[in-house]
Structure formats: structure tokens, C-alpha cells
């Protein structure tokens, strides 16, 4: 999913954060950084300050019986993956993210092999300039705040557990990756719409609000002559209030250079 920002030397790629090791990338993934002098990522996800957001060291999130059931169910499922690390010090929304990361690792998917990290490594080895659209903890700070009125994100955590137990979670991951390879922005928009309808307290701040916040930062960078590749998650590029829509709102035309199939 590669866009050319018309009448500029800049491009934008919709990435996937995890991939299997040695995955064959679509041609446009390699084309994305041709003639580029700078990479702009969502945030510096290697910053260790991210690990401190969404923690609950006192275990207060375990107190409601409903939450305790969810954490115990998750622990049993993780044990079936051969994982026994305690995660009761995490709020439900953060525990859900941890749980998903364990699932992805179990099936051979890794952030280290994801498109973002591959491009970050490319930038470092090539001596390219690197910049970011937000502070490292911004996404998690937003989630931590928005989930306060939703039992700490417990409904989302419960859904993740159910989907993992049924196999639906893995099916959804595979669907996103197929759509990404095919540049199927229509189906990706459907996936995002479904998730926003089910969990607005998660996906509105995580996707739409961040897209809006990125616009002024991107606008400043776009004024510069350095040919730049913006690297954002694929779901940020589709649907209403997408990052593409934000760029168009200031008069920039983004042309998708890849097509389905």
C-alpha cells in the first residue's frame, strides 16, 4: 500500500507491524524507499518509556470478579503456548496487547520482522534521516485515558481471549496481512469499521485521533525538500478520518500506486 503525494517528492506507505521471519514482501514495499532521503515513522517504538504505560502494580484491576476470570482465562491460554510470565501487573487493555503479542510470537509473527522495523533498520544502515509523528508513549497514553470509562478496556481484553480460544484471532491477523499484500483498502476499511463499531473507546483514539494529531507535524515536514517516506500502520490509511483524508484536507492529493491482486 504505497501512495505518492502528488506534486511533491514524498511518499507514504501503509505498513504492517508484524510479519513472519523471511516473509516475501510485495514489490512496492521495496519500491517505497527508492530515491528517499528521510523516513518518518509513527513513533520510536524502541523507547523503553512505553513499557511503563498501562501498568497496575497493585493489581487493582483484578478486584472485580469479571476481571479476575478474564486474567485467569488468559493465563491458561498462554500456558498452552508455553508462556508462564505473570502479567497481572497490567491493566486490561495493556494485558490484551501483551496477550496478542504472545499469540503472534507463538505463530511465528514478530515486530522485529514487521515492515516498520525493516524500514527502520534500512534507514539506520543507509544513514538516512529519521523523524517521528508523535512521542513514543502517545498511543498508549491515549488508550490508558480512553479506557478509564470502559473498565480499563476489559471488554476488549475479553474479546481478544474469546477470539484466540476460537481461532478467530489468528484468522483476523491473516486477513489483515492478505489485504496488506493485495493493497485491498476496501476490506481493510471494513475491518477498521467493524472494530470501531465494537470498541470505539479503543479504536477512535488509537486511529482517528492520532491521524488528526499527526497532520500538523506532517505538514511541517512536507514543506521541506528532503524526499520523505511516511510509514504508518495500514489501518491509518483507510476509512473515514484516515491519515490520507487528513492530508487531502490541506490540499494534498495522494495517489495509490498499488492495486488489488
Image (cartoon, grey):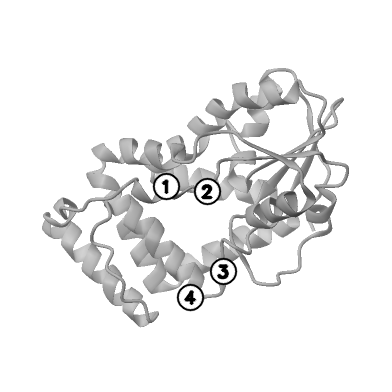
Dots 4, 3 in contact, CB < 8 A: no
- Measure the alpha-carbon separation of dots 2 and 4: 21 Å
At 69% across and 18% down in the image, what residue appears?
A: 250
Foreground mark, 2 or 4, reads 2
Which residue occupies the foreground of this view, 169 or 126? 126
Is residue 33 shown left or right of residue 53?
A: right
Residue 45, numbered label: 2
Dots 4, 1 in contact, CB < 8 A: no
Looking at marks 2 and 4 on the same chain, the residue that comes earlier in the sequence is marked by 2
Residue 260 visible (yes or no): no
Residue 109, numbered label: 3
Q: Secondary structure at mark 2?
A: loop
Looking at marks 2 and 1 on the same chain, the residue that comes earlier in the sequence is marked by 2
Q: Position of residue 219 (x, y in %)?
A: 68, 22
- Measure the alpha-carbon separation of dots 2 and 1: 7 Å
Q: Position of residue 170 (x, y in %)?
A: 50, 69
Q: In the rendered image, which quarter is residue 244 located in?
A: top right
Q: To which residue does mark 4 refer?
A: 106
Foreground mark, 2 or 3, reads 2
At 12% across and 54% down in the image, what residue appears?
A: 64
Amino acid at each position: 500500500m504505497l501512495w505518492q503525494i502528488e506534486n511533491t517528492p514524498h511518499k507514504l506507505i501503509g505498513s504492517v507491524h508484524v510479519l513472519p521471519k523471511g516473509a516475501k514482501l510485495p514489490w512496492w514495499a521495496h519500491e517505497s524507499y527508492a530515491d528517499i532521503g528521510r523516513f518518518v515513522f509513527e513513533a520510536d517504538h524502541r523507547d523503553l518509556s512505553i513499557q511503563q504505560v498501562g501498568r497496575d502494580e497493585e493489581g487493582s484491576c483484578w478486584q472485580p470478579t469479571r476481571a479476575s476470570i478474564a486474567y485467569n482465562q488468559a493465563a491458561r491460554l498462554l500456558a498452552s503456548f508455553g508462556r508462564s510470565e505473570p502479567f497481572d501487573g497490567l491493566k486490561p487493555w495493556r494485558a490484551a496487547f501483551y496477550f496478542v503479542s504472545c499469540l503472534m510470537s507463538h505463530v511465528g509473527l514478530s515486530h522485529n520482522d514487521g515492515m516498520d522495523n525493516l524500514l527502520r533498520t534500512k534507514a539506520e544502515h543507509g544513514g538516512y534521516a529519521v523523524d517521528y509523528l508523535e512521542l513514543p508513549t502517545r498511543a498508549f497514553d491515549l488508550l490508558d485515558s480512553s479506557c478509564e470509562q470502559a473498565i480499563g478496556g476489559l471488554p476488549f481484553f475479553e474479546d481478544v481471549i474469546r477470539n484466540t480460544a476460537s481461532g478467530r484471532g489468528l484468522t483476523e491477523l491473516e486477513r489483515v496481512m492478505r489485504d496488506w499484500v493485495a493493497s485491498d483498502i476496501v476490506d481493510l476499511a471494513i475491518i477498521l469499521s467493524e472494530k470501531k463499531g465494537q470498541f470505539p473507546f479503543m479504536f477512535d483514539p488509537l486511529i482517528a485521533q492520532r491521524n488528526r494529531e499527526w497532520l500538523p507535524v506532517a505538514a511541517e515536514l512536507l514543506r521541506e525538500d528532503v524526499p520523505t517516506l511516511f510509514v504508518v500502520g495500514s489501518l491509518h490509511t483507510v476509512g473515514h478520518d484516515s491519515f490520507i483524508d487528513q492530508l487531502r484536507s490541506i490540499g494534498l492529493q495522494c495517489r495509490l500506486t498499488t492495486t488489488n491482486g
